[in-house]
Image (cartoon, rainbow, N blue to C red):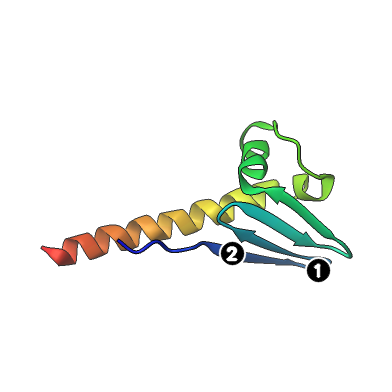
């Protein structure tokens, strides 16, 4: 099975966010970085030590990651169905 690397980009009027398999990078006049695990933890439960700029958009990041994962699951089911 081929492993696909995740990369999501979110654009805001004053910032660009790049989400990869294990990290979140935000370019907002300066580079801001946090682990994806910490950002998702903060979005889900309010716990996690992340920069304030990422706290503001943590729910957007969670929604984006969940959407991409759902699309991947749908594709896997469709490919599996075609294999029979």
Provide the secondary structure element on which disc 1 rests.
loop
Q: Residues within 10 Å of mark 1 (few under 14, many from 20)?
A: few
Label drawn at residue 31: none
Residue 35 at x, y percent in the picture? 67, 47
Q: Residue at x 84, y 63 (%)?
A: 28
Q: Which residue is mark 2?
A: 8
Picture quarter with the C terminus: bottom left
Q: Is residue 41 above or below residue 60?
A: above
62 relative to 68, above or below: above
Height in image: 21 above or below 27?
Answer: above
* Quarter assignment of residue 13: bottom right
Choose top left, top right, bottom left or bottom right for residue 32. bottom right
29 with respect to 68 (left or right): right
Point out the residue furthest to the left here. Answer: 84
Q: Residue at x 63, y 48 (%)?
A: 36
Q: Is residue 57 left or right of residue 2?
A: right
Label 2, secondary structure: give it.
strand
Q: Nearer the viewer, residue 38 or 46?
A: 38
Mark 1 — residue? 13
* Residue shown at the point (71%, 34%) measured from the top left: 48
Question: Which image quarter holds the N terminus?
Answer: bottom left
Residue 64 spot, x, y in % from top left: 57, 56
Residue 6 in the image, given as x and y percentages of width and height = 52, 61
From the viewer's perspective, is 62 left or right of 12?
left
Image quadrant where residue 15 sits? bottom right
């Amino acid at each position: 099975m081929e492993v696909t690397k995740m990369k999501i980009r979110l654009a805001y009027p004053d910032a660009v966010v790049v989400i990869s398999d294990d990290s979140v990078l935000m370019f907002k006049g300066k580079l801001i970085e946090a682990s994806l695990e910490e950002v998702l933890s903060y979005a889900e439960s309010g716990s996690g030590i992340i920069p304030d700029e990422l706290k503001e958009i943590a729910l957007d990041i969670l929604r984006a990651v969940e959407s991409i994962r759902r699309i991947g699951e749908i594709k896997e089911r469709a490919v599996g169905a075609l294999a029979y």
